[in-house]
């Protein structure tokens, strides 16, 4: 017994000496002796090549459970976007009107996250009319947030781009991000909040009047919409009328974006010009 133990000790010692001499550090004996755990594959090597197994840790966004370790710098990509960002910084009430792809929703949500993270407001309130784009999808199961989730998906996408989905869910659970259906906004006063009303072209004049008068102390409200893409019957949308009336109010900013401010695929700007 003593002889076999001596042989094993001598073998381990020779293995360690060989590993140190030739730089072979991944032998089973060395790993077991030093209690070193192997790193998962592809660490620090980017995405796996075609045909390789990519089951290791990855820094790419497919890791939904990992908190986002960086924050993209918010920069305007056009003069219209720069004017919108400046208006949000300088006014408590902003109406952003423009065609699809001009970044209205994204900039509004990004500014809301920025204000919340800086402690300027106590919560974010997101509201959007539950109107289908030309077809009815029928009954939706679940509670209020589950029913509104398909309609609020663009807002969730903008939130998840500024925050990780794990943090978004945590903030919603704490009530710091609130989903507020337009039908339940009557009688409320939104103090110390950043309110984003998206797709306002699908609101009537009465609904918009009710929403705009919810603004409370130390709050900012950004209303976004495209008057040319209303899913309501002709003449029912009140966004254009409200924006025209509010232009005369000095402390309210009405920012009108144009085709040159579209930051989606270049074909979007081309289609908007002819459709």
Image: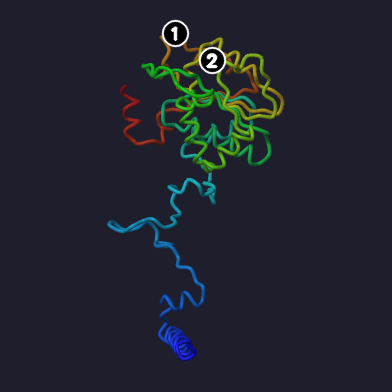
Decide: few, some or many residues near mark 2? Use Cα within 10 Å; few <14, some 14-19, many ≥20: few
Mark 1 — residue? 235
Q: Please tell me which residue is depicted at 59% across the width and 31% down the height of the picture.
A: 87
Pinpoint residue 47: horizontal percent, then vertical percent.
Answer: 37, 56
Closest to the observer: 138 or 258?
138
Secondary structure at numbered mark 2 = helix
Q: Is residue 129 above or below residue 104?
A: above
Which label sits in the foreground, 2 or 1?
Answer: 1
Q: What color scheme is it?
A: rainbow
Could you tell me how far apart the alpha carbons at marks 2 and 1 are, in whole angstroms? 15 Å
Pinpoint residue 67: horizontal percent, then vertical percent.
Answer: 54, 48
Mark 2 — residue? 244
Count of numbered badges drawn on the protein: 2
Pinpoint residue 118: horizontal percent, then vertical percent.
Answer: 66, 41
Closest to the observer: 125 or 72?
125
Please identify the quadrant where the C terminus is shown.
top left
Secondary structure at numbered mark 1 = loop
Q: Is residue 42 above or below residue 212?
A: below
**Mark closest to the chain's N terminus, 2 or 1:** 1
Q: Is residue 188 above or below residue 222?
A: above
Q: Are marks 2 and 1 in contact (CB under 8 Å)?
A: no
Closest to the observer: 196 or 243?
196
Pinpoint residue 263: horizontal percent, then vertical percent.
Answer: 41, 36
Relative side of 56 to 197, left or right: left
């Amino acid at each position: 017994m003593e002889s076999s133990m001596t042989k094993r000790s001598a073998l381990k010692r020779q293995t360690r000496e060989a590993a140190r001499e030739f730089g072979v550090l991944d032998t089973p004996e060395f790993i077991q002796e030093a209690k070193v755990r192997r790193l998962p594959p592809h660490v620090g090597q980017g995405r796996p090549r075609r045909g390789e197994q990519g089951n290791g840790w990855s820094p790419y966004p497919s890791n939904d459970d990992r908190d986002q370790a960086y924050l993209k710098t918010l920069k305007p990509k056009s003069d219209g976007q720069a004017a919108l960002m400046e208006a949000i910084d300088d006014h408590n009430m902003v109406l952003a009107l423009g065609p699809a792809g001009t970044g209205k929703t994204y900039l509004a949500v990004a500014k809301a996250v920025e204000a919340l993270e800086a402690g300027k407001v106590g919560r974010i309130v997101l509201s959007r009319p539950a109107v289908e784009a030309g077809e009815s999808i029928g009954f939706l199961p679940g509670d209020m947030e589950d029913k509104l989730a398909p309609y609020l998906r663009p807002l969730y996408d903008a939130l998840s781009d500024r925050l990780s989905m794990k943090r978004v869910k945590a903030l919603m659970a704490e009530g710091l991000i609130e989903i507020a259906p337009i039908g339940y906004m009557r009688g409320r006063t939104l103090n110390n909040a950043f309110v984003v009303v998206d797709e306002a072209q699908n609101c009537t004049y009465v609904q918009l009047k009710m929403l705009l008068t919810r603004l409370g102390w130390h709050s900012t409200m950004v209303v976004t919409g495209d008057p040319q893409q209303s899913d309501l019957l002709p003449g029912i949308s009140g966004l254009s009328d409200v924006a025209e009336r509010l232009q005369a109010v000095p402390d309210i900013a009405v920012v009108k974006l144009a085709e040159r401010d579209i930051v989606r695929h270049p074909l979007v700007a081309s289609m908007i010009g002819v459709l």
